Amino acid sequence: MAMKIRLARGGSKKRPHYSIVATDSRNPRDGRFLEKLGTYDPMLAKDNENRVKMDLERIKHWLSQGAQPTDRLARMLEAAGVLPKKVRNNPKAALPGKRMAELAKKKAAAAEAPAAAE
């Protein structure tokens, strides 16, 4: 059985509230789960201690049993010190899109035109 530690969404429209759960990866996101391991409330401030609550002992147990955390949960567990920090590199994230690149070229050409006329 492929185990996952992931977020299950609750709350109303535009007011999300997530439960951290251990479940079979084949189950739906908000479907059946084996154990609730904590909560995550993204509506709270980032420095609020109630934003993320996790039962670290049970999470460590499930990780030792072979459960794989999702990307978002892996980041939370890295912040909590349960998982080692992972090096991430996305060099394309800093590059402008097509439209902004075109505007930058036009702006550079416009800046050169008056200087060349003198």
Image (spheres, rainbow, N blue to C red):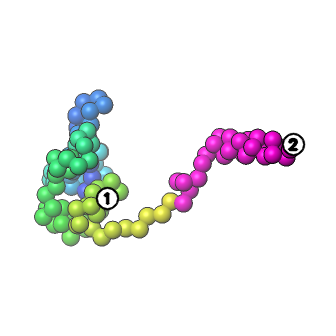
Residue at the limit of the structure toward the right, as seen here: 117
* Disc 1 target residue: 75
Q: Is the magenta stretch mostly helix, strand or loop?
A: helix
Residue 45 x %, y %: 25, 43
Task: Give the residues in magenta.
Answer: 91-118
* Disc 2 target residue: 117
| Label pair 1/2, CB-CB below 8 angstroms | no
Tell whether position 114 is magenta. yes
Residue 12 x %, y %: 24, 30
Tell whether position 83 is magenta. no
Left or right for 118, reference 43: right
Q: 112 above or below 65?
A: above
Q: How many marks can you see?
A: 2
Q: Distance between the residues labelled 1 and 2?
A: 54 Å
**Front residue of this view, candidates 67 and 59:** 59
Judged from the image, the secondary structure of the residue bearing numbered disc 1 is helix
> What amino acid is labelled 1 in the image?
Arg
